[in-house]
């Protein structure tokens, strides 16, 4: 779908977009984040059904709505680039759906842990990528990742009480966290690696820094470390 | 949970609230609407999974988020009345959950029809009730019923195309619409009639008009007529 004249005249695209590979990469990136948010909405809405109390249900449902609320700005930006948001999301649906099928939580607390470490990991990854973007797009990506309303704090609080009440849960949830990380590292690249543009993004361009293999390695190390920190926040054994 | 001092000092309650029966009735009303919105969120989020396209999925998910977004203002008002929102919602959970269990849509288009006629009916009913409230509460109730973003138009459009493509669907959906109305009339009162305060609301008070049996009958006639109109908007046979 081409952008309407009103949209194209009101937006002056940064120089970086003169490179068609860069534009395609940004379209891919905003597409994958958009679908990730829609998918997070679905997952959190589903998890909210398992909530033991109406307070917890409302908290999860609100988290779901917050995720979905981020989609509109991403789609507006995609349209300003002359891209159809639905076409931009399409290539990533199968990989993201597959990831969620492989990591369906068995119960309420597994759902909470997945919401916490899954969103945390995705946020860390997109935050790393944002540094390789033109400033406008980078800011949009960062703003779509904000944790509004301290929902993460609620999740940490709930998971900690579960482990405090039944310490054996700590070990089980630690395994679950490791499995989530493993699935994320094996599934997510499968979707991304097929996409030349996203790969090109990470390798840089005329006016953008790239990421060599050593730097990519350091990035994965940082992502793994942050994941360990998050699991540590959930409890002594988690 | 008592209201915080900041909330009680900033709100001067209208004279109507000096009548404890009226206050209890408003708490009940805002409680039932709040839980209805949370429940609508759950239902729409569930229906969005059946959507044939990602566009439809996003539209339903957005409708779900809009419903949930109305809860915060209702809860703020409940807290200003010194009521705990979760205690206020509790008495209505069973009846509303039961209604949704009895009217689970068999497919995507039944879900759309239920979203359209179910929300329409609930909105009509609360709009009728709003005329028996003090102006502030009445306005809050009306604002929580606004159809933001023309979502109803989207539903009408989708259902019409389904019937246009397969006219036999019209008859099936007409039956479905009748069944929804029947369940709403038999299930909803079961929850409300047990609640003395809501009944007292409809029968009036010192400074508020009441509703005699004849007026109540006329109200049900209006609700039924509006339901017929809505079904008519969906298609020739629906």
Image (cartoon, coloured by chain):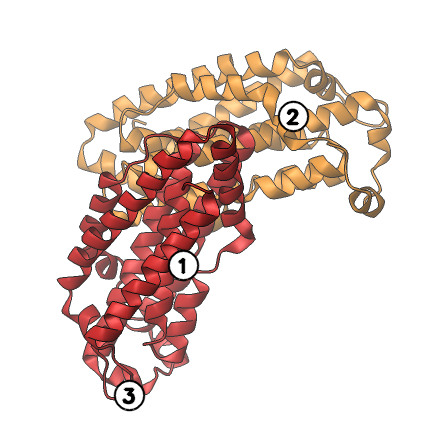
Chain colours: A red, B orange
- Which residue is identified by label 1? A72
Q: Nearer the viewer, mark 3 or mark 2?
A: 3
Front position in the image: B52 or B134: B52
Question: Are discs 3 and 1 located on one and the same chain?
Answer: yes
Quarter placement of the N terminus of chain B: top right
At label 3, counting other C-alpha atoms closer than 10 Å, the crowd grade (few under 14, some 14-19, many 20 or more) is few
How much space separates mark 3 and mark 1, taking CA atoms? 29 Å
Where is residue B56? Give x, y as percent: 30, 45
Question: Are discs 1 and 2 located on one and the same chain?
Answer: no
Label 2 SS: helix
Label 1 SS: helix
Residue B87: give its label: 2
The residue that appears at 37% across and 73% down in the rendered structure is A137
Quarter occupied by residue B80: top right
The reply to whether discs 3 and 1 touch (Cβ–Cβ < 8 Å) is: no
In the displayed structure, does residue A222 sit left or right of residue B196? Answer: left
The residue that appears at 20% across and 26% down in the rendered structure is B168
User: Which chain letter goes with mark 2?
Assistant: B
Q: Nearer the viewer, mark 3 or mark 1?
A: 3
Q: Nearer the viewer, mark 1 or mark 2?
A: 2
Question: Are discs 3 and 2 located on one and the same chain?
Answer: no
């Amino acid at each position: 779908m081409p952008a309407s004249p009103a949209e194209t005249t009101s937006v002056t695209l940064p120089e970086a977009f003169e490179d068609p590979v860069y534009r395609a990469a940004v379209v891919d990136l905003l597409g994958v984040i958009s679908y990730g948010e829609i998918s997070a909405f679905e997952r959190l809405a589903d998890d909210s059904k398992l909530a033991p109390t109406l307070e917890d249900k409302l908290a999860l449902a609100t988290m779901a709505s917050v995720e979905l609320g981020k989609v509109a700005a991403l789609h507006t930006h995609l349209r300003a680039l002359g891209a159809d948001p639905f076409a931009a999301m399409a290539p990533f649906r199968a990989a993201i759906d597959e990831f969620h099928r492989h990591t369906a939580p068995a119960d309420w607390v597994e759902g909470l842990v997945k919401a916490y470490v899954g969103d945390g990991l995705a946020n860390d990854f997109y935050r790393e990528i944002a540094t390789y973007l033109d400033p406008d797009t980078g800011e949009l990506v960062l703003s779509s990742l904000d944790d509004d309303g301290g929902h993460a704090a609620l999740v940490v609080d709930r998971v900690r009480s579960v482990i405090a009440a039944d310490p054996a849960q700590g070990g089980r949830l630690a395994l679950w966290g490791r499995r989530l990380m493993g699935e994320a590292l094996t599934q997510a690249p499968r979707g991304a690696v097929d996409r030349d543009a996203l790969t090109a993004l990470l390798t840089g361009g005329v006016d953008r820094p790239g990421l060599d293999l050593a730097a990519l390695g350091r990035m994965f190390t940082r992502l793994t470390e942050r994941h360990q920190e998050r699991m540590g926040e959930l409890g002594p054994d988690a």
